[in-house]
């Protein structure tokens, strides 16, 4: 437990945790990329994937599908309404308003992106490991091909000819 760490604290908030087992817990991202954007997080304060124990890693394998089910059973409109109302920044309000206005809010996802920012250079901003589960909906982007490759935007599309 790290007293300053967001994930160490939020795992004790029964209103925030959607699913948990002995080693991992699931919360929704407060700045959702899409409705149902979840974070599956070790209960231990560990930063890197290389810090995860074999038991934690095995539990990830077992927990991802359980997490997706838990997200699909959650009243996302109620949660994003609460997130919007308690947001302390314009950015937080913007993301949650977008989730509330999303045309696929409340619908079953058609696909998911999974992602882990394993280190600061990879984009991690909270140094407590968290696995992103990002639901995707058919038609939510004009051309979704490339998916997670868009972590470096100009390298995402590998179909467009280049000189
Ligand atoms: Zn932590």
Image (cartoon, rainbow, N blue to C red):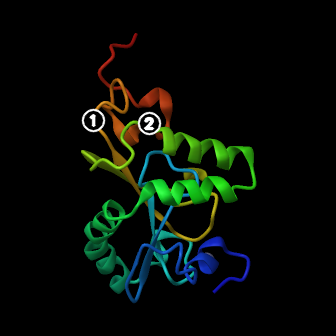
Residue 132 position in % (x across, y down): 44, 58
Q: Quadrant of the N terminus?
A: bottom right
Residue ID at (38%, 64%): 74
Locate residue 55 relative to residue 122 in the image: left or right.
Answer: left
Q: From this viewpoint, which residue is outermost toward the top?
A: 163
From this view, report whether residue 160 is shown above or below residue 154: above
Q: Quadrant of residue 23?
A: bottom left
Residue ID at (59%, 73%): 7
From this view, report whether residue 159 is shown above or below residue 52: above
Mark 2–mark 1 Cα distance, whole angstroms, equals: 18 Å
Residue ID at (63%, 52%): 84
Regarding mark 2 in the picture, which secondary structure is present there? helix
Alpha-carbon neighbours of circle 2 within 10 Å: few (<14), some, or many (≥20)?
few
Residue that numbered label 2 is attached to: 150
From this view, report whether residue 111 is shown above or below residue 132: above
Q: Quadrant of ligand 1?
A: bottom right
Residue 22 position in % (x across, y down): 39, 89
Residue that numbered label 1 is attached to: 138
From this view, report whether residue 29 is shown above or below residue 21: above
Of pointers 2 and 1, the one earlier in the residue sequence: 1
Residue ID at (61%, 79%): 8
Q: Quadrant of the C terminus?
A: top left
Regarding mark 1 in the picture, which secondary structure is present there? loop
Locate residue 100 relative to residue 145 in the image: left or right.
Answer: right
Residue 32 position in % (x across, y down): 51, 50
Q: Nearer the viewer, mark 2 or mark 1?
A: 1
């Amino acid at each position: 437990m790290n007293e300053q760490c967001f994930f160490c604290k939020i795992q004790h908030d029964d209103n925030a945790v959607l699913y948990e087992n002995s080693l991992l817990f699931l919360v929704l991202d407060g700045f959702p990329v899409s409705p149902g954007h979840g974070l599956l997080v070790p209960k231990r304060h560990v930063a890197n994937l290389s810090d995860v124990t074999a038991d934690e890693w095995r539990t990830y394998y077992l927990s991802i599908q359980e997490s997706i089910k838990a997200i699909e059973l959650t009243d996302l409109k109620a949660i994003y309404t609460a997130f919007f109302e308690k947001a302390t920044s314009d950015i937080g309000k913007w993301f949650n308003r977008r989730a509330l206005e999303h045309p696929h809010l409340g619908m079953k996802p058609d696909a998911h992106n999974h992602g882990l920012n394993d280190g600061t250079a990879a984009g991690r901003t909270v140094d407590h490991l968290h696995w992103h589960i990002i639901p995707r909906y058919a038609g939510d982007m004009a051309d979704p091909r490339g998916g997670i490759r868009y972590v470096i935007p100009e390298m995402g599309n590998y179909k467009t000819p280049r000189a």
